[in-house]
Every structure is written in structure tokens, then in C-alpha cells.
Amino acid sequence: MRQVRTWGARLVSKARSEQGQALVEYGLVLALVSVGTIGVLAALGADLQNVYDHVNDALEKVLGLPGHCGHKACK
């Protein structure tokens, strides 16, 4: 618990300086982008999986290879 307080105090002290303020702003932007990316991937995950499956099936038909590496055990 002491480490958490120390870390929090360091974060607050850095946030008060201009350099720390920029660091906190970059951290918030990074967190927002991460949450947005996760949300988009969660919403489109099934659609993306269907696209990848379709491409994989088309490649298997064209190349005549079962599975991802050509071995029958992979399918």
C-alpha cells in the first residue's frame, strides 16, 4: 500500500509541472485510443473473423492445401 501512495504522490507532483502535465495528457490520450480500439475490435470482431475465414478458405481452394501449413494434421 505504501508503494501505491508513493507512486500516487510522484504522479501528482509530476502532474503539477509542465513536463508532468504533458506526460499525463499523453497517458490520457493513449488510454482513450486504447479503449476506442478495444471497443471497435469488440464490435467488429465477428465480422473480421468471417473475413479472415473467407480469405483462408479461398486460399485453400486455390492452393489446394489443407490447414495453415499444408499438413493434413493441421486441418
Image (cartoon, rainbow, N blue to C red):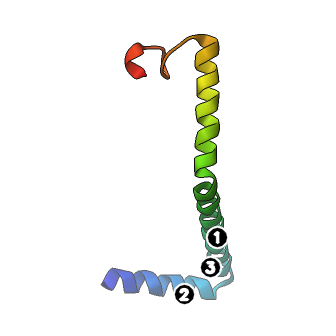
Does residue 72 sit above or below 31 in this rendering? above
The residue pinned by badge 3 equals 20
Q: Residue at x 60, y 69 (%)?
A: 31
Q: Residue at x 59, y 25 (%)?
A: 57
The residue pinned by badge 1 equals 32
Q: Residue at x 34, y 80 (%)?
A: 3
| Crowdedness near tag 2: few (<14), some (14–19) or many (≥20) residues, C-alpha within 10 Å | few
Precedes in sequence: disc 1 or disc 3: 3
The residue pinned by badge 2 equals 13
The CA distance from mark 3 to mark 2 is 8 Å
Q: Secondary structure at mark 3?
A: helix
Tell me where residue 32 appears, x and y as whole percent.
Answer: 64, 70
Mark in front: 1 vs 2: 1
Marks 3 and 2: CB-CB under 8 Å? yes
Name which residue type carries label 2. Ser
The CA distance from mark 1 to mark 2 is 23 Å
The C terminus sits in image quarter: top left
Mark in front: 1 vs 3: 1
| Crowdedness near tag 1: few (<14), some (14–19) or many (≥20) residues, C-alpha within 10 Å | few
Front position in the image: 69 or 73: 73
Name which residue type carries label 1. Leu
Tell me where residue 49 appears, x and y as whole percent.
Answer: 58, 42
The CA distance from mark 1 to mark 3 is 18 Å
Q: Secondary structure at mark 1?
A: helix
Q: Residue at x 61, y 71 (%)?
A: 27
Question: In the image, 3: left or right of 26?
Answer: left
Does residue 68 sit above or below 1 in this rendering? above
The N terminus sits in image quarter: bottom left
